[in-house]
Amino acid sequence: GAVVSQHPSWVICKSGTSVKIECRSLDFQATTMFWYRQFPKQSLMLMATSNEGSKATYEQGVEKDKFLINHASLTLSTLTVTSAHPEDSSFYICSARDRGDWADTQYFGPGTRLTVL
Amino acid sequence: SQQGEEDPQALSIQEGENATMNCSYKTSINNLQWYRQNSGRGLVHLILIRSNEREKHSGRLRVTLDTSKKSSSLLITASRAADTASYFCAPNRDDKIIFGKGTRLHILP
């Protein structure tokens, strides 16, 4: 099946710093990628939809100035958590929709664990 | 967008038994996907069933879809310890996926 990678797999940073997370579709092109956040023992919460070459669409309650999304190519989307605080500590997961797949299957990355001290 | 609701929320069975979990949704779909998530990991795509299909198999997995009842089921036969995970359904209408709480499956030795 199609593979989606994320980098880094985990990151620890100090409060107030910014962290960038990369999401790549390795063997297919993805015009649309999605970013999710998951807190312990909870389900995934959709944060935003990232479209190649255009602005991301954010879900209600998600601050677009805090979570900057850039989808500059058909295989790469980045999420930057700006001025991170301890409450931003979470598991961030991206997914990519394979448009070459007749069913528009969505494939998920392995996730990035962010810890803000 | 669509959100699937999985039932039960938690399920514990003995290794070797079959596990069945259900999914309900509210509006029309193009297809429905099932995912597995091991603790602290990403989601693994298990199987996709199209809206015009009623049943689909993949190894030990069997998925059914009843569009008239807006429901789906995932059956895992001959369960193994490695099947311990959370399972999510994703009704898809060519739109973003909104996840429900999932079913936490625990396989007992």
Image (cartoon, coloured by chain):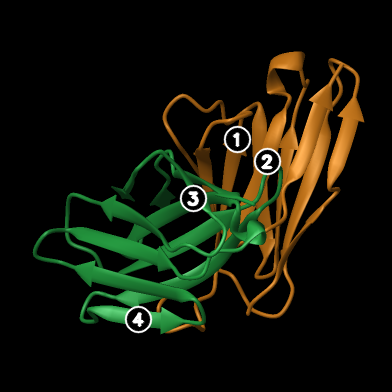
Chain colours: A orange, B green
Q: Nearer the viewer, mark 2 or mark 3?
A: 3
Tag shown at residue B79 = none
Mark 4–mark 1 contact, CB under 8 Å?
no
Q: Nearer the viewer, mark 4 or mark 2?
A: 4
Along the viewing direction, whichever of B66 and A13 lies nearer the viewer: B66
Q: Which residue is mark 1?
A: A38
State how far apart marks 4 and 1 are (Cα).
30 Å
Q: Residue at x 39, y 42 (%)?
A: B100
Q: Residue at x 58, y 30 (%)?
A: A41
- Depicted A16 relative to depicted B75: above or below: above
State how far apart marks 4 and 2 are (Cα).
31 Å
Pointer 2 indicates a residue of which chain?
Answer: A
Q: Which residue is mark 2?
A: A92
Amino acid type, mark 4: Lys
Mark 2: few/some/many CA within 10 Å (<14, 14-19, 20+):
many
Q: Secondary structure at mark 4?
A: strand
Q: Nearer the viewer, mark 4 or mark 3?
A: 3
State how far apart marks 2 and 3 are (Cα).
30 Å
Please state, as top left, top right, bottom left or bottom right, where the C terminus of chain A lies in the image. Answer: top right
How many numbered marks, from 0 up? 4
Pointer 1 indicates a residue of which chain?
Answer: A
Residue B103, image x and y in percent?
44, 45
Pointer 4 indicates a residue of which chain?
Answer: B
N-terminal label among 2 and 1: 1
Residue A46, image x and y in percent?
50, 41
Q: Which residue is mark 4?
A: B56
N-terminal label among 4 and 3: 3
Residue B93 is left or right of residue A93, and the answer is left
